[in-house]
Amino acid sequence: MFLLYNLVLSLLAPLWAPVMFWRSSRRAEKPNWAERAGDFPFRATKDSRRIWVHAVSVGEVMAALPFLKALRERLPSHDIVLSVTTSSGHATARDKAMPYVKHLVYFPVDVVRFQMAAMTRVRPEVVAIMETELWPNFLWAAKAFDAKTVLVNGRISDRSFRRSRWVSPLYRWMLRQVDAALMQTEGDAERIRALGAGEVRVVGNTKFDEAAQIADEGPRWRAELGLGEAFVVVVGSTRSEMEEDLVVAALDRAFGDAIRSGEVRVVHAPRHLERAPDVLAKASARFGSAALRTSGSVAPYLVLDTYGELGGVYSAADAVVVGGGFDRLGGQNILQPLALGKPVLHGPHMHNFRDIAAASLEAGASASCADAEALADRLSAVRGDPELRGAMGEAARALVRANLGAGNRYAEAVAALIERA
């Protein structure tokens, strides 16, 4: 399987390589291509003891923070090398993760010579992969250097599970290279067992820990963003034009005149910053007055075009709309606003966050809205009923409190792997 994968990888290089470069070129910050070729700016020494943690992008980096913090406290003699794939993930890691890690690098392209070059420089005792970012040559190189390999905060969505079964021999081979698959839920555990994993345990979801660490600084954010005493809707992580259009239309239907007068304020954070100008144009066309966060202007409709502020801005909200689930994109993380006790509204297509969304809906902390009309109706209800807002907020906090501690449990599991080795 290893040879077949690399043969196919080589034959398809004229297709995937240009796509990779094109996608990278669209980002505001370009990746470090030397690091993507495995040329890391440090070397292993005979005394170095290292743990390599891989997190793909912003979501995985944020989910890794409680684990990284606990790992730093549990194993102070080990250096942590954190790798990311995207430039947005790199920016988030620079801002949030550096107190816990020794080196931050871009993840090598999954070519044997690149992965071997990187592994030679790191020489980790343990490779910890956040969620389920499995790459055959990365795993092969890790085992070639006798590293223990572990999935941390592992998850497999329904969509990923269906797709993976089309290449089940490759997954069986990869999962034989994984010493322990530590998963978020029993459903995730069942799916990875079906794909061929050996040692599988349910440990929990670090995103509850990560969300609980966000400081509740509502008054500060209201003052900084010029929100005053208005009713504030924070829209987080819309991911497509369809979602932008749906949310803007719902806001217009529910609060059009109130937004134009400033009685209701909106802060809208698209998932990808390059979408900010388009969101600004849509909001300006509907409501007349809109501004980018980086402009320093105050407007009834503010478009957040900065990294790392959305989690804090949620604390200024009276109601939160989370994207990714209105279009068929699998949803986005709703835990940050839940941890802050905010009523959360999202779309029906939350399969990438199925368990969290289901638990939140069952607890009465969130509501699913199928279209712009349903979202507008729910927004109006939340604004008009303070008791409903309070009940949803308390249910949200209780849900998060009941699921804390996964970061420490994952760190203990990695420490046990090192001791066993």
Image: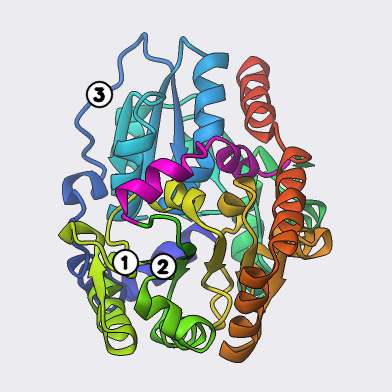
Residue occupying the point 74% across, 49% down: 394
Q: Position of residue 275 (x, y in %)?
A: 29, 74
Dot 1: within a 10 Å radius of its alpha carbon, few (fewer than 14), some, or many (20 or more) residues?
Answer: many
Q: Position of residue 279 (x, y in %)?
A: 31, 78
Badge nearest the viewer, 1 or 3? 1
Residue 273 location, quadrant: bottom left
Badge nearest the viewer, 2 or 1? 2
Residue occupying the point 66% across, 66% down: 157
Of the image marks 1 and 3, the number of the one nearer the N terminus = 3
Tell me which amino acid carries mark 3: Arg
Q: CA distance from mark 1 to mark 3?
A: 46 Å
Q: Secondary structure at mark 1?
A: strand
Residue that badge 2 annotates: 265
Of the image marks 2 and 1, the number of the one nearer the N terminus = 2
Q: CA distance from mark 3 to mark 2?
A: 51 Å
Dot 2: within a 10 Å radius of its alpha carbon, few (fewer than 14), some, or many (20 or more) residues?
Answer: many
When the figure is inspected, residue 167 is found, relative to residue 230, above or below; the finding is below
Residue occupying the point 39% across, 50% down: 222
Of the image marks 3 and 2, the number of the one nearer the N terminus = 3
Residue that badge 3 annotates: 43
Tell me which amino acid carries mark 1: Leu
Q: CA distance from mark 2 to mark 1?
A: 8 Å
Which is nearer the eye, 65 or 146? 65
Decide if residue 268 is on the left or right side of residue 171.
Answer: left
When the figure is inspected, residue 336 is found, relative to residue 281, above or below; the finding is above
Q: Position of residue 73 (x, y in %)?
A: 53, 15
Decide if residue 349 is on the left or right side of residue 125.
Answer: right
Which region shows up in magenta?
Answer: 203-226
Residue that badge 1 annotates: 302
Q: Secondary structure at mark 3?
A: loop
Q: Is mark 2 in CB contact (under 8 Å) with mark 1?
A: yes
